[in-house]
Image: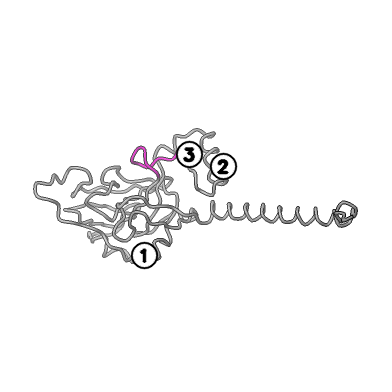
Amino acid sequence: MEKNIYAISYKLRRELYHKIASAVGLVFVFFIVTSLFMTFIIFPVANKSDSMAPDIPAGSYEFVSPLLKNPDRGDVVLLQNYSNGKQTPLRRLLRTVSLFVTVHKWQPFDESPVSGTRPVMRRVVGLPGDTIYIDRYVVFIKPAGQNHFLTEFELTNSKYNARILVPPAMWDSDFGAKASIPQITLAEDEYFVLGDDRLSSADSRIWGPVKQPAILGKALLLYFPFNKFSFL
C-alpha cells in the first residue's frame, strides 16, 4: 500500500513547510520591494490626451520619478490637483496607502487642475523669478536678473516640438487656451507650464502658474508605443 511519505516523516514534512514558507516569503518581499520602488523611485503613467502632442501622443505610457520635483526649464512634469493641499490628513494617508498597495494603479481623491480628470503632464517653460508673456502662441521669457526677453527655445537645452497651428478663420484668440497673455512675474515657488499642443491645451494660460507642491514628479521616459520610445 502506497503511503504519502510526508505523512509519516516529520523531518520531510518540516522541510516541505519550510520551502513553502520561503517561497511565500520571497513573493511577499518581491511585492514589497516592487511596490516601494514603484511608489518612491519611478512609476508608470498613462497619457490619455493630445495636450502634449506631437512628442507625447495620446495613448502613450511614460515613467515618472517622484524624486525629481524641482524641474528645469523644458522638463515634462506630472501635476496633481490644486485642491490636494486642502485634503484632510486622513484623505492624504488613505491616498498614500492606496498608491503603495496598488502600485499607483488606483489614485483616490486625485483630480487635475481641470475638474473631474486625472493628473496631467505639462512642460515647464517658466521658472521661479521669470517674467513671461505670450504673443500669438510664442512664449517670451526674461529670467530673473537678466534684461532681455528670449523665446523658450533659446533658453532651454531640451529638444522638443510645440504644435502651433494657424487658428481657423474668425477664431477667438481669447477663447480657451489664449494666444496671448500680458507679462507676469513668477514667485519663488511658482512654475509656468504649457502643453506642447499650444492651440488646445489647458495649462497655465488658463490655471495660472502652478506651485511647486503641485508637482508629483518628472517624466523621464516614453516607453510605449515602442516606435515613440524616447527620453524626455
Question: How many residues crowd mark 2 within 10 Å: few (<14), some (14–19), many (20+)?
Answer: some
State the residue position of label 1.
228
Q: Nearer the viewer, residue 135 or 3?
A: 3
Comparing marks 1 and 2, which lies closer to the viewer? 1
Q: Amino acid at mark 2?
A: Val
Q: Is residue 146 above or below residue 82?
A: below
Give residue 144's quadrant in the image: bottom left
Q: Nearer the viewer, residue 83 or 28?
A: 28
Q: Which residues are magenta?
A: 108-118
Q: Is residue 106 left or right of residue 16?
A: left
Question: How many residues crowd mark 1 within 10 Å: few (<14), some (14–19), many (20+)?
Answer: some
Measuring from the top left, give residue 71's x and y in whole percent: 40, 56
Q: Dot 1 lies on which element?
A: helix
* Labels in figure, total: 3
Q: Tell which circle, 1 or 2, labels the residue nearer the N-terminal end.
A: 2
Assign the N terminus to one quadrant of the image.
bottom right
Q: Dot 3 lies on which element?
A: loop
